[in-house]
Image (spheres, rainbow, N blue to C red):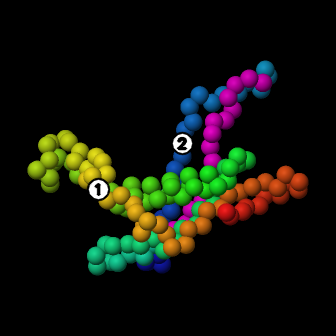
Amino acid sequence: MASACYMERIDLSAHGFYITPDIGFDWKIAKGTPFRYFTYGAAFAEVEIDTLTGDFHTRSANILLDLGYSLNPAIDVGQIEGAFIQGLGWVALEELKWGDANHKWIRPGHLYTCGPGSYKLPTVNDIPLKFNVSLLKVNTSSGVLVYYTL
């Protein structure tokens, strides 16, 4: 599948940017807010898809994030894992059903699937079999950029 996309020049990556509000810094008087909280990272997931049924299973996921200096890497890794699974549920499991011509039993303009009682939440079975989260870290003694995994 990936090679077919390559041959058809279909981009399989996602890109996003956030425009941070209220950024500014006056270098002459050294005042202002030059940065807000931000991170950089990369993620790769291997997904097995049954093309007959549409069923899928995330076999592995690898995430590398640069969080700067972490106060508690174990908490950060847990937050990253939770965000990945939440995003998986949002993108792959949640089906929005609005009141329209296709869903006449729902009031027009009303969102039917607005809570966990009406759509499938990710479960422990949705967690990738191999789930690696790594944090980028600067070695303070040598200034070398390294990464570690918990």
Q: Amino acid at mark 2?
A: Tyr
Near-viewer residue (53 or 73): 73
Residue 137 is one of the magenta-drawn residues: no
Residue at image mark 2 = 18
Q: Is residue 30 visible?
A: yes
Q: Position of residue 85 (x, y in %)?
A: 46, 59
Q: Amino acid at mark 1?
A: Tyr
Location of residue 30 by image quarter: top right
Residue at image mark 1 = 119
- Mark 2 surroundings within 10 Å by alpha-carbon count, few (fewer than 14), some (14 through 19), many (20 or more): few
In the image, farthest residue toward the top? 29
Image quadrant occupied by the N terminus: bottom left
Q: Taking 68 as reference, is 85 left or right? A: left
Residue 35 vertical position relative to residue 11 in the rendered view, above or below: above
Residue at the (59%, 28%) spot, across then down: 22
Q: Position of residue 134 (x, y in %)?
A: 65, 61
Q: Position of residue 123 (x, y in %)?
A: 40, 63
Kindly check if marks 2 and 1 are in contact, taking CB atoms under 8 A apart as contact.
no
Residue 140 vertical position relative to residue 28 in the rendered view, above or below: below
Residue 81 vertical position relative to residue 2 in the rendered view, above or below: above
Residue at the (78%, 58%) spot, across then down: 145
Q: Position of residue 32 (x, y in %)?
A: 70, 25
Q: Which residues are magenta?
A: 30-45
Q: Taking 22 as reference, is 120 left or right? A: left
Q: Taking 85 as reference, is 42 left or right? A: right
User: Along the polypeptide, which appears first: circle 2 or circle 1?
Assistant: 2
Q: Is residue 8 visible?
A: no
SS at circle 2: loop
Location of residue 92 by image quarter: bottom left
